[in-house]
Image: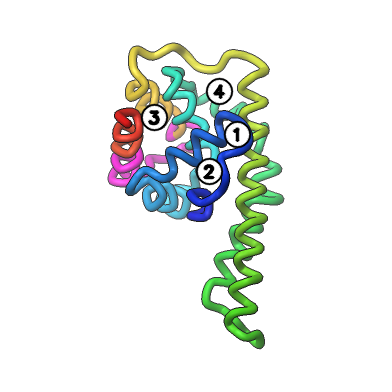
Amino acid sequence: MTQAASKASPQGSPLWQFSLDFYRTPGLAEACIRLQDEAGIDVNLLLFLFWNASLKRQLSAAEIAAIDGHVAAWRRNAVVPLRGIRRALKGAAGPLPAGDAELFRTKVKGLELEAERLQQQALYEFSRSAPLGAVAQTAQEAARGSIAAYQVFAGRRFPDTAVDAVLGAFEKYQQH
C-alpha cells in the first residue's frame, strides 16, 4: 500500500476503511514496505489478514492460498506494474521539468492506490462468499496465527523485526 493511502478518503468496503485507518499507525507503513520488498508479501493481503484478525478470525495457509489465487492476476497485471512505474519515476525527471515529472508520478500514484482499493474490494467480496478462518480467543492471537500461516503459504520466513513491528502496530491500533 502506498503512503498516499493515509491521505485517501475513507470510502469503499469495510476492509478498505480498516486499511486506511490501520495504515496510519506509526511504524506500520515502513514495516509493510519492508515485508513487501524483502519478503515479497502482498500488503493488501496482509491488511486483509489483519482485518480478519480484528474480527478474531485466524486464517490458515490453505485459505491464504485460495485468497491469493483469487487476486494474483490483478496484483500481477495492475498493482505491481503501477508500483514499478511510480518507483521508477521517483526523482527521475528525464527530459521533463521536475515539476511535470512529479505531477505525472502523483497521477500514477493515484492509479496505484485505486488498483489497491479494487484489489481490496475483491478480497472483501471473496470474504463475503463463505466464512473464513477459525475463531481465535483474541485479535492478537488471530494476527499471530495468520502471519505464521502466511509464512507457510509463502514458503519463507519473514524478517522478524518487520513482523514484530506490524504486530506491535496492530496491538496499538486495537487499543485506540
In this view, the residue in front, 93 or 17, is: 17
Q: Amino acid at mark 4?
A: Glu
Q: How many marks?
A: 4
Q: Are marks 1 and 2 in contact (CB under 8 Å)?
A: yes
Q: Which mark is residue 42?
A: 2
- The residue shown at (30%, 43%) is 165
The earlier-in-sequence mark between 4 and 1 is: 4
Q: CA distance from mark 3 to mark 1?
A: 15 Å
- Quick one: quadrant of the C terminus? top left
Specify the farthest residue to the front: 9
* Of the image marks 4 and 3, the number of the one nearer the N terminus: 4
Q: Which residues are magenta?
A: 151-166
Q: In the image shown, does 2 or 49 lie closer to the viewer?
A: 2
What kind of residue is marked 2?
Asp
| Circles 3, 2 touching at the beta carbon (< 8 Å) | no
Q: Position of residue 155 (x, y in %)?
A: 46, 37
Q: CA distance from mark 3 to mark 2?
A: 15 Å
Q: Position of residue 136 (x, y in %)?
A: 39, 14
Q: Is residue 122 above or below residue 32?
A: above
Q: How is the image coloured?
A: rainbow
Up-down: is 67 above or below 38? above
Residue underneath mark 4: 63
Q: What's the amino acid at mark 1?
A: Asp
Residue type at numbered disc 3: Ala
The residue under the point 70% across, 42% down is 73
147 within the magenta span: no
Q: Which mark is residue 68?
A: 1
Q: Crowdedness of circle 2 by 10 Å Cα count: few (<14), some, many (20+)?
A: many
Figure quadrant of residue 12: top right
Horizontal placement of 13 versus 152: left or right?
right
